Image (cartoon, helix red, strand yellow):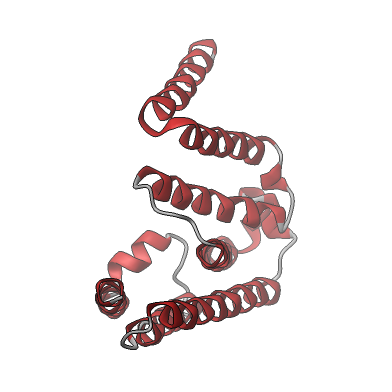
Amino acid sequence: MGLAHVVGVSLLCIAVGGAVLLGGGRMAAVIAVYVGLTLAYSFYLKHEPVIDIAAVAAGFVIRAVAGAIAVDVPVSNWFLIVASFGSLFMVAGKRHAEFHELGEDRGRHRATLAMYSAEYLRYVRSTSSAITIAAYCLWAFEKADVAAGPLWFQLSILPFVLSILRYALLLDMGQGGAPEEVVLGDRVLQILGACWLAVFVVGVHAG
């Protein structure tokens, strides 16, 4: 155990140091926040209902922000809203799948699952997906006004919303325990994602 602690601390120091060298102070700060969140989740936050799913979702958002900093792309308020509530939607779906898969043993696997109900997790999914869609639509129309060009950003709303609805359907069918498997395993979701990306890219270049 002592060796594991030493290796763990060493790797953390290397990660933060490497971030400073490769990405500067902002990247190091993001990495430090991510490490702090991960430790807090491991020791405490995972035992607190609602806070646990928010912490996991925050981890996805921090990684997205780190990617934006790495490629030197500004992070807008709309991006943060869509990323935050989109992540919360996915995490709630993951918890919902675990809730049903684990059955009566759910509380032994994850303490907070004993405090959630299927209806509550469905409510979180509905609320977070609605905010995600609304924020993306507002961003798309605002972006289109700034670009003052063809309606590519508005058109990107259609595949984006259909992707959310498709993912919600897959969650209702009992999937979602592993979000990456849902995305990589559903052909329709992949096609919708490709359509969204194509329209988005055209909108960026047309603007």
In the picture shown, does residue 203 fall above or below 65?
A: below
Q: Quadrant of residue 112?
A: bottom right
Quadrant, the N terminus: top right
Residue nearest the observer in this picture, 99 or 169: 169
Residue at 51% x, 18% y is 9
Q: Residue at x 35, y 87 (%)?
A: 155
Q: Is residue 135 left or right of residue 176?
A: right
Q: Position of residue 186 (x, y in %)?
A: 30, 74
Q: Tell me if 188 is positioned left or right of 74 in this view.
A: left
Q: Nearer the viewer, residue 9 or 182?
A: 9
Taking the image as shown, residue 26 lies to the left or right of residue 191, namely right
Q: How many marks?
A: 0
In this picture, is 22 found above or below 99?
Answer: above
- Image location of residue 179, percent across then percent down: 42, 62
Where does residue 68 sit, x and y in percent of width and height? 41, 50
Quadrant in the picture for the C terminus: bottom left
- Which residue occupies 65% across, 61% down? 104
x and y percentages locating residue 81 in the rendered image: 57, 66
